Image (cartoon, rainbow, N blue to C red):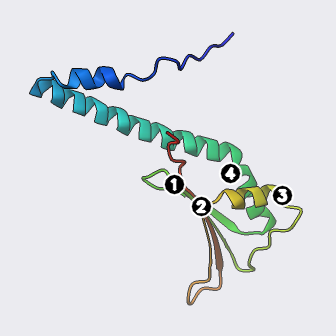
Amino acid sequence: MQEFDFTNTDMADDLSEMAEHLSQEEATAAIAAIKALRDGKENTEAEDFKNWFDSAFLPILKDFAATTTSKLTVEQDARGDITATFTCRCGFDITANQRRMHMVVSAADHISVNRWSGSNEVEFTLIFGIPEDEE
């Protein structure tokens, strides 16, 4: 059996009451602890997002790259957002039969297609933003 109890999670009143009586040293320590907790949470969220992306979307993107004989580059930036870029000389065609690729494209936050000056290649880029807190 598993149980998840979220009934007593509002400790804001307790924290507010404690904050009124903190010494300067306690306040400094509390702020440092909160910042460390938030930084750790951001790092964990970015890592979790990358792991999820690698499991859910990366196999689909790799299959599409193989199908289109293109080069696939995947990068995660400091904020946790993931950019997948396909590079190919022939262009890209996502057919009706490639439903999984349609799903991946529809999940992208930004889509761009470029052909840079002086290049014989087309770039197809999908950017996936790390999900924001839904609080």
Question: Which residue does the numbered mark 4 point to in the structure image?
Answer: 58
Q: Which label's residue is closer to the chain start, 1 or 3?
A: 1
The residue drawn where x is 24% and y is 21% is 17
Q: Percent from the top left, x then y, of residue 44? A: 47, 37
The residue drawn where x is 63% and y is 47% is 53
Residue 28 visible at all: yes
Residue 109's disc number: 2
Q: In this rendering, would 135 be left or right of 62?
A: left
Task: Examine the rendered structure and indicate whether residue 107 appears above or below residue 2.
Answer: below
Q: Quick one: 90 or 23, which is closer to the camera? A: 23
Q: Quick one: 105 or 63, which is closer to the camera? A: 105
Q: Nearer the viewer, mark 4 or mark 1?
A: 1
Q: Quadrant for residue 11, please give it.
A: top left
Q: Is the residue under label 3 in contact with that under label 2 (CB below 8 Å)?
A: no
Helix, strand or loop under label 4? helix
Question: Which residue does the numbered mark 1 point to in the structure image?
Answer: 81
Question: Which residue does the numbered mark 3 point to in the structure image?
Answer: 99
